[in-house]
Image: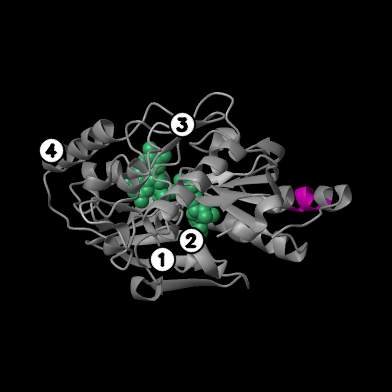
Amino acid sequence: MEVDVTREQRAAVVAALRKSLTAGQVEVDVPLARLTTMRVGGPAEVLVTVATAADAVATAAIARAHDLPITVLGGGSNVLVADRGARGIVLRMHGGEVRAEGDDGVRADAGVTINGLVRWMVGRGLAGLESWAGTPGTVGGAICGNAHFQGRLISEHVREVRLLQPSGAVVDVPAADMAFGYDRSRLQHSGEVALSVVFDVAPGAAPEQLRLVARESLAFRKRTQPLHQASAGCIFQNPGPEAPVPDGVPRSAGALIDKAGLKGEQAGGAQVSPLHANFIVARPGATAADIRGLVERCRDAVHAGTGVRLEEEIVYLGDWADSSERHR
Ligand SMILES: Cc1cc2nc3c(=O)[nH]c(=O)nc-3n(C[C@H](O)[C@H](O)[C@H](O)COP(=O)(O)OP(=O)(O)OC[C@H]3O[C@@H](n4cnc5c(N)ncnc54)[C@H](O)[C@@H]3O)c2cc1C
């Protein structure tokens, strides 16, 4: 959604936010590039960084009162922010707490990183999420896109999600009602914000054993992903069972891009990673437009060569006005 925020409106919103938030931080015209792993994109008109549900709820109430949209940002590891940045309020969920919920559950605030959550669990001998070590980003981002790793979905471990609804209501939603699927959850369409998540865990494991699994996951990522370069992880979802993938080609977006001859391809500061063709990396000086242009070339080349329509896994955030018809 796009909005024109007048200077007075913005000042009123900032004043209201600063008055209402207990610990959240309110900043104006903040470059978002450094808050994303792709490291490109323009500024947030108003950036509100919160760790607690109470501050997220207060921010949303003020946005509603001023009729401003909210763009939610977690760890910024699955987004491409437009070069023009984002108007209105960017609500960045950053930090928070993890706490036990009975013997076999753990509640994590949305802004807690997946790595932080895994560390917390491993140290206490709680099994379940150890193989998710190394997944960048936050609990909220992982729930929104239903993060996946080696064929498993993070939703398999989710018991319940606490959501802030557009009306301002806070509700606890069981996993079965979250519309989870591969790269899917209801958050992608509902306008709701995840505040915290309860995960099912298995107590009584040996931390050393869990650490071993976590280390294996990290080593696998190091071998297979260009971790030393700026990226947003996999650009496209892998094609589903209905897609007309040619015989002999794995059902993988990276394999299809490779087959289209684009592995290693460069455009401006963007490059299809020579290590993993479903990663586009941003070299110094890259713009969001460079990245998006190369994403579209990959999609078009795969479609022209095989008839498979790749769908983006990354999310376009901010003011992409010139190409709004292509938004997800
Ligand atoms: C090197 C690398 C490796 C990666 N490996 C994997 C992998 O193995 N598996 C995988 O699935 N992904 C992977 N990713 C992508 C990314 O890490 C995940 O998608 C991650 O879950 C995104 O979390 P985030 O907090 O960074 O979300 P962001 O990128 O900040 O946001 C992503 C989306 O979630 C929304 N969102 C964020 N927080 C909330 C919230 N609290 N409530 C509602 N909506 C919210 C945002 O609005 C946005 O639409 C990788 C990325 C990188 C850079």
Circle 2 residues within 10 Å: few <14, some 14–19, many ≥20? many
Numbered disc 1: secondary structure:
strand
- Looking at numbered disc 3 in the image, what kind of residue is underneath it? Ala
Q: Any magenta on residue 14?
A: yes
In the image, taking residue 259 as reference, residue 86 lies left or right, namely: right
Residue 56, how many percent across, how many down? 58, 56
Tell me which label, 2 or 4, sits earlier in the chain: 2
Query: Label 2 is placed on what type of residue?
Result: Ala
- Give me the C-alpha separation between circle 4 and circle 1: 29 Å
Between disc 4 and disc 3, whose residue precedes? 4
- Label 2 close to label 1 by CB (< 8 Å): yes
For label 2, the residue is 194
Q: Give the number of the mark in front: 4 or 3.
A: 3
- Residue at point 65%, 49% (across, down): 318
Of mark 4 and mark 1, the one earlier in the sequence is 1
Q: Is mark 3 on a helix, strand or loop?
A: loop
Mark 2 residue CB less than 8 A from any atom of ligand 1? yes
Mark 2 vs mark 4: give the one in front.
2
> Which circle, 2 or 3, is nearer the viewer?
3
Mark 2: secondary structure? strand
> Which of the two discs, 2 and 1, labels the residue nearer the N terminus?
1
Residue under numbered circle 1: 161
Which of the two residues, 275 or 122, is positioned nearer the viewer here? 275
The residue to which callout 3 is attached is: 230
What is the number of the mark on residue 208? 4
Q: Which residue lies furthest to the top in this view?
A: 284
The boundaries of the magenta stretch are 12-16
